[in-house]
Image (spheres, rainbow, N blue to C red):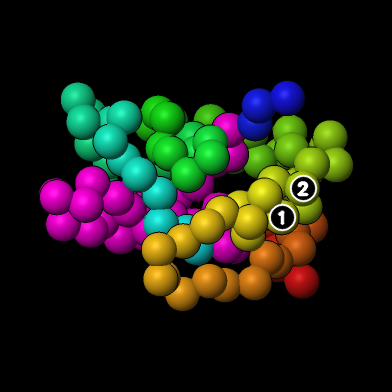
Amino acid sequence: MCLAIPAQVSSLFDREQRSAMVDILGVRRRVSIDLLQDDPPSVGDWVLVHVGFAMSKISAAQADEQLKMLAVLGEASAASDEAGGYETSGDEVLPAARHFETENRYEIR
């Protein structure tokens, strides 16, 4: 099964690299934004990430809905683990975090 995970853009790199740092359930990863050239993301935007590529931009409400659905399906930790497994090109690799839904918010433990 293919799974695109909501991620929030935390920083953008220079245009030649066409990449961004995103936060995926508390795990920061550098992803390609090549597929979003027609509507490039800005810091704070939400994107759907699949195998290291930002596939499309989504609203904050859509991201929240999808994160809640992952939690209901028991897939939030699997999504976090998948995000933690992306290879990087020398960037800092942060450990995968475990997330739990509490009162409609996500908490890292």
Q: Nearer the viewer, residue 104 or 8?
A: 8
Question: How far across and down, in percent of the image, does residue 79 sit?
Answer: 69, 46
Classified by dominant secondary structure, the portion drawn in magenta counts as strand
Say left or right for 106 vs 58.
Answer: right
Q: Nearer the viewer, residue 9 or 84?
A: 84
Residue 15 magenta? yes
Q: The disc labelled 2 sits on which kind of residue?
A: Ala
Figure disc tally: 2
| Quarter holding residue 66 | top right
Residue that appears at 52% across and 57% down:
87
Say left or right for 47 vs 35.
Answer: right
State the extent of the magenta-drawn residues as a range: 4-27
Residue 68 lies, with reference to residue 10, above or below; the image says above
Residue contact between numbered discs 1 and 2, judged by CB atoms under 8 Å = yes
Which quadrant would the N terminus be assigned to in this image?
top right
Name the residue carrying label 1.
Answer: 81
Q: Nearer the viewer, residue 24 or 30?
A: 30
Q: The disc labelled 1 sits on which kind of residue?
A: Asp
Question: How far across and down, in percent of the image, does residue 58 sit?
Answer: 43, 31
User: From this viewpoint, is residue 55 visible?
Assistant: yes
Residue that appears at 40% across and 63% down:
89
Name the residue carrying label 2.
Answer: 78
Count residues near mark 1 (Cα–Cα under 10 Å), then give few for <14, some for 14-19, many for 20+: some
For the residue labelled by badge 1, is the local secondary structure a helix, a strand or a loop?
Answer: helix
For the residue labelled by badge 2, is the local secondary structure a helix, a strand or a loop?
Answer: helix
Count residues near mark 2 (Cα–Cα under 10 Å), then give few for <14, some for 14-19, many for 20+: some
